[in-house]
Amino acid sequence: MNETRFDNPLPENSISLLTVPRANYDELIFKILEQSKSPLVCYVTLNKASSYLAEGLKKHNMSNNNFYFIDGISAMLRDVKEEKNCLFISSPNDLVELSIAINEIVSSKKFEMLIFDSLSNLLVYQKNNQHGLSQFFSSVSSLIKRQKMRALFICFKNDEKFPFINENAHFIDRNINMQGQ
């Protein structure tokens, strides 16, 4: 299914690819988080530090208590300390560490939704590892289906044309193409 708006909730037990323009990415992310209405969200971030996202949630009057972050960017930029609702991984270059982190966190609680921000960033870190990237995506997709979750994989406009996205399209139940809404 292809759509151009994010008006309705994601179907249960589904994987969606959300394509967003870079220009108003921040605004769209928080709009989507406001609309998600999932009681417990696992947010994997390879794009923004979890502290930035937590501040944004506060600004948009959303509780951080509904989110658990897997942060793959902060430890590359600064020393990190353990936080209550966050697991820091060393680098988005390590797909095994990222996969284990997602599996452990998602299996530990009853998350209804996983947000992966973003495939575009993962493609940058893994540009020479398409096979490993496909294995990672297959593994995470299987986990989502087993856990009967909803998942939203974010991708920047034009990055959806990367061969990796097309080769793994069979895992994606719904495509949503946001055009600056």
Image (cartoon, rainbow, N blue to C red):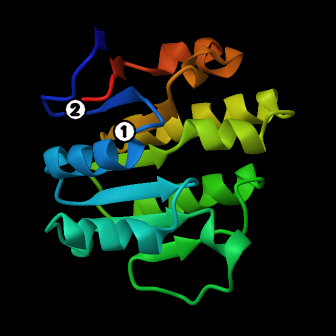
Left or right relative to 26: residue 90: right
Identify the residue shown where x is 80% and y is 33%: 127
Residues marked 2 and 1 touching at CB (< 8 Å): yes
Expressed as whole percent of the image width and height from the top left, the position of residue 32 reads: 24, 43
- Residue at 18 percent of width and 72 percent of height: 63
Q: Amino acid at mark 1?
A: Ala
- Residue at the farthest right position: 128
- Badge 1 is on which residue? 151
**Crowd around label 1: few <14 · some 14–19 · many ≥20 (10 Å):** many
Question: Where residue 19 sits in the image (x, y, percent)?
Answer: 43, 26
Tell me: residue 79, above or below residue 66: below
Q: Is residue 147 or residue 163 the one in the foreground?
A: 163
Q: Quadrant of the C terminus?
A: top left
User: Which mark, by number, is residue 18?
Assistant: none
Please report the residue visible at 53 percent of the width from the left and 73 percent of the height from the top: 87
Q: Is residue 24 above or below residue 61?
A: above
* Foreground pick, 15 / 157: 157
Q: Secondary structure at mark 1?
A: strand
Question: Is residue 26 rendered to the left or right of residue 45?
Answer: left
Residue named by callout 2: 10
Quarter occupied by residue 131: top right
Q: How many discs mark residues in the rendered view?
A: 2
Q: Quadrant of the N terminus?
A: top left
Return the disc, 2 or 1, that comes first in the chain's sequence. Answer: 2
